[in-house]
Amino acid sequence: MNKLPSAVAGPANKEDSGMVDSQCANTSGRLLSRYPQDFSGRSAGVSFLHLLATFFVVWVAGGAACSRQQRIQDFQPPPVVFESVPTLEGLAEMVNRTDEIQKLQSNSTTVTAPDFSGKGLSSTLILERDKHFRLRGKLSPLPTVLVDLGSNDEVFWFQTPDGMQKILYYAEHEAYAKQTERMVLPVDPTWLIDALGLVHLDPATVTEGPTRRPDGKLEVRSQIAMAGGNYRRLYVIDDKTAVVTEQYLYDTSDRLVARAIASDHRFYQEVQCSMPHRIDIHLQPDVGPPMALEIEVGTYSINQILSGDPQLFTMPTGASKKINLATMGGVAFGVPPGVSDANSPYAGVSNGGNPAPAAPLSTAWPGGAVSEGESSGAAAEPESTLKLPPEPTGGPAQYTAEAQYAPATDYNPTLRGTFMR
């Protein structure tokens, strides 16, 4: 195993290494969603489902914690571990140091969302790999738990108010993994664990790389076996510190369905790896509007769970309504209440009430031409604030996982219809 420099062999300041701080570092997040105009008439339940779908994306992926606090100045930046382009095996060894992290806990997390009129959810989170987690959030100073998200080995769920009652959305992991049309999450939850910084790079799945990009970083491409075929995943990795800074996921049609941008990495001496403290996640489900989340975290409490609750990872049973996401089909996201436009990207239920395949969202990149098979009369996509580089002479560029990915050193692609504010 590669040795880290002696300068990072121990903590920068030991005087607080075993202390429990009385206050946790503030963590904030901004939930950013962009919905078409014809979606504004949806019911509160459908709106809340979209919100919680994005929350699920984040918290199934891991989380930030601060039950045992270290001051920010106690953290060192990621150490330099490579002076040249490493072998795939050497790179995987350094990236996979995050395998040492098996548990995370957060007692102070705040997520701000437009659906809550800018008010933040005060949340607690407990996570234990591979699939155990629990997030419960409330609007301070009210004591009532407003959001309950969780997962165990068999099922994941999220529970939310529905008027004066509660509604529970859930699905068995195995059944949801077999879906070829994802209604809420376009990716497997295990990918989302990687998105929060707990990346595992399997050399057996790599198809190309590591290669040096024009911006100096390293790029690795791999494949993931999914229900509908192989998905393509692209990693962008710092060439000096081996921290993963960007991840992109393409479906079987080379459509970008998810991306994660990680920054503000800090080195945790006890596990000899670095974790990001700022993460931007963008998702494009097969049906429904794109979702985006921008979060900032304080400090992580690693490999400890301070809870003796035997029901910690048990799905709640008190909801009056229960909806199985694995059997939703095109119903829940097919046509929101009040939407009747046949050209709407959300039109997916026939007049007889029988579910029909939802009309596909545009697969065009922001500012690009109409994709093959897409009607010019389809609902217009919102124009993105991020533009593609100019098309090269001789025809449009093919921005897929097969083509050269980094046309410009300062270019970061965005999902269509997603605005970073």
Image: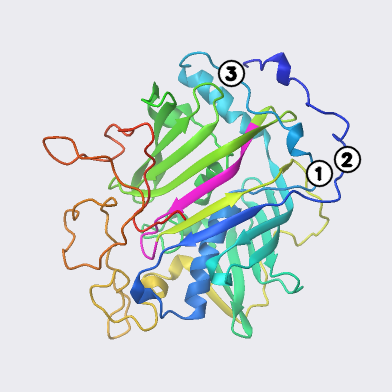
Look at the magenta stretch and give its main secondary structure: strand
Q: Give the range drawn in magenta.
A: 274-289
Marks 2,3: beta carbons within 8 A: no
Marks 2,1: beta carbons within 8 A: yes
Q: What element carries label 2?
A: loop
For marks 2 and 1, the one nearer the N-term is: 2
Estimate how packed mark 3 is, as few (under 14), some (14 to 19) or many (20 or more) residues with alpha carbons within 10 Å.
some
Residue at point 27% right, 85% down? 351
Asked if residue 70 shows in the view, the reply is: yes
Residue at point 29% right, 62% down? 381
The numbered mark at residue 323 is none
In-front residue for pair 230/286: 286
Q: Mark 2 points at which residue?
A: 19
Asked if residue 187 shows in the view, the reply is: no
Q: In which quarter of the image is the N terminus?
A: top right
Residue at point 35% right, 73% down? 37
Estimate how packed mark 1 is, as few (under 14), some (14 to 19) or many (20 or more) residues with alpha carbons within 10 Å.
many
Q: Which residue type carries mark 3? A: Val
For marks 1 and 3, the one nearer the N-term is: 1
Q: Name the residue under label 1.
A: 68
Residue 279 among magenta residues: yes
Q: Which residue type carries mark 1? A: Arg
In-front residue for pair 343/393: 393
Q: Mark 3 points at which residue?
A: 81
Q: Distance between the residues labelled 2 and 3?
A: 30 Å
Which quarter of the picture shows residue 75? top right
Which quarter of the picture shows residue 319? bottom right
Q: What element carries label 3?
A: loop
